[in-house]
Image: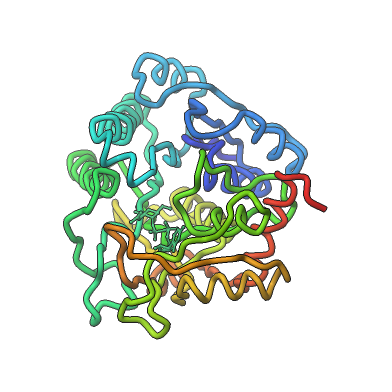
Amino acid sequence: MARILVTGGTGYIGSHTVVELMQQGYEVIIVDNLSNSNIDVLDGIEAIVGKRPTFENIDCTNYVDMDRLFSRYQPIDGVIHFAASKAVGESVEKPLMYYRNNIGSLVTLLELMKTYQVPNIVFSSSCTVYGQPDAQHLPVDESAPIQKALSPYGNTKQVNEDIIRDAAHADANLHATILRYFNPIGAHPSAMIGELPNGVPNNLLPFVTQTAAGLRQELKVFGDDYNTPDGSCIRDYIYVVDLAKAHVKAVERMLIVPEREQVETFNLGTGRGLSVLEIVRDFMEATGVKVPYTIVGRREGDIEQVWANPKYANEVLGWKADTPVKEVLLSAWKWEKRLRNIV
Ligand code: UD1
């Protein structure tokens, strides 16, 4: 079975993808420097799959270490590149750290892929590249215009997409799949792996589950005066396990469809937008747990509404994100309860 190098494989989306890959029989090599994840994630993966993935504690920007890794695990059939810093606010304060980490790691990988003749990469991009799409582009498909990024983090995604296109243009052997994620939420149904936010969560769902668990006093809903039905922002929340499965489909396609385009880009979402208030309501209904919240002012840089048109991924990858949202919210709660020892 094919051998796949997964950078950032102990992270949130990475770990769920490793599980799905291993369950399909792929051999997985995880590279992660544990800068925003925990080594115990490997235990969670092992508990689900019944097998421990190979793990290397390496920083993907370290050329010498990465060279050694590529040489040691030859032949590698494909790379999934998750490893990146992802906090928007932090990227505004530490732009150079974000550019070094997020850009440096991709360049290092692409150089070594060429040296070691690894022909395929799947790259984690984000719907952040679309900014706020015009009304005529909602739901947003892959042809919607890219807009100037609002943060260094967002810019690293755009620049990395360009780097991949330029590298593929110069090298006919390189094939890439760019996956633009919408808002991943939830945890593996086993509650053995899930999201592990560092400190106070920036993202909505971890804040909701931590508030439900009593760690936070109340959720602050950032704005109810947007031009949306209930005034709160709208996003396309996608189950992380559905998202992980899209990676397996992308890898399958990379390995068995030689006639595909050199660079393919897919939006990964459900096709359905939900507001912040709908998420809070659905969470309370699904779990029976109260989430105290107040409405506060808008958060700087927030997009009013964006959701995906996932038709291209549905058709070409033969994949669909269809887990009901309440089931997804329950999985997030089950994970939070396990973390906090709540029965
Ligand atoms: C954010 C990033 C995005 C990144 C993604 C990674 C910004 C502006 N965007 O997306 O670039 O790819 O995370 O996961 O930071 N909300 C609240 N209260 C909270 C937290 C969030 O009301 O305590 C609201 C936000 O205003 C937003 C929605 O919940 O409307 C989702 O927020 P979040 O989970 O942070 O995701 P994005 O902002 O969509």
Front-most of 268 and 217? Answer: 217
Residue 83 falls in which quadrant of the image? Answer: top left
Figure quarter occupied by ligand 1: bottom left
| Residue 18 horizontal/vertical position (percent) | 59, 43
Residue positioned most to the right: 343
Front-most of 285 and 216? Answer: 216
The quadrant of the image that shows the N terminus is top right
| Residue 176 horizontal/vertical position (percent) | 34, 47
Q: Name which residue lies at 39% across and 33% down.
A: 118
| Residue 7 horizontal/vertical position (percent) | 47, 34
Residue positioned most to the bottom: 229
Residue 53 falls in which quadrant of the image? Answer: top right
Residue 233 falls in which quadrant of the image? Answer: bottom left
Image coloring type: rainbow
Q: How many marks?
A: 0
| Residue 108 horizontal/vertical position (percent) | 31, 27
In-image side of 283 versus 132 (left or right)? right
Residue 340 position (above or below residue 99): below
